[in-house]
Image: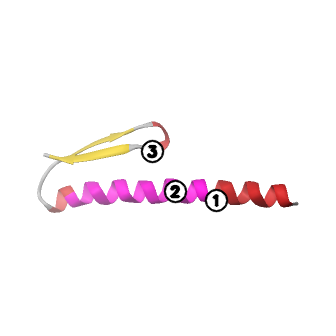
């Protein structure tokens, strides 16, 4: 039972991290658009590492 709890907790934390990372990526793109610039976005495997620059 304890193994299942730890597994569910670890999986939940990973999902939360991916969601927050995706939100941050979207927010950075929106910030560029609000400043009337073009967002240049790059994403990598599973959205773990991405970058946004404004031009």
Q: Residue at x 34, y 56 (%)?
A: 26
Which mark is drawn over residue 40?
Answer: none
The residue mark sitting in front, 2 or 3, is 2
Region in magenta: 12-31
> Mark 2: few, some, or many residues within 10 Å (few <14, many ≥20)?
few
Cα distance, mark 3 to mark 1?
A: 16 Å
Q: How many residues crowd mark 3 within 10 Å: few (<14), some (14–19), many (20+)?
A: some
Q: Which residue is mark 2?
A: 17
Secondary element type, mark 3:
helix
Separation (CA) of disc 1 from disc 2: 9 Å
Q: Which quadrant is the N terminus positioned in?
A: bottom right
| N-term mark: 2 or 3 | 2
Write the residue at 31% across / 45% down: 51
Quadrant including the C terminus: top left
Residue 47: which numbered mark, if any? 3
Of the residues under marks 1 and 2, which one precedes in the sequence?
1
The residue labelled by disc 1 is 12
Q: Compare residues 48 and 39 and report the one nearer the observer.
A: 48
Q: Is residue 14 above or below residue 49?
A: below
What is the x, y in percent for residue 46? 49, 42
Secondary structure under badge 2? helix
Which of the two discs, 3 and 1, labels the residue nearer the N terminus? Answer: 1
Q: Contact, CB < 8 Å: mark 3 with mark 1?
A: no
The structure residue drawn at horizontal position 42% and vertical position 54%, both measured from the top left corner, is: 22
Q: Which residue is found at the position 43% from the left and 55% from the top?
A: 21
């Amino acid at each position: 039972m304890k193994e299942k709890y730890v597994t569910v907790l670890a999986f939940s934390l990973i999902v939360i991290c991916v969601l927050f990372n995706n939100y941050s990526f979207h927010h950075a793109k929106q910030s560029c658009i609000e400043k009337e610039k073009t967002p240049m976005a790059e994403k990598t495997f599973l959205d773990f590492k991405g970058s946004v620059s404004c031009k």
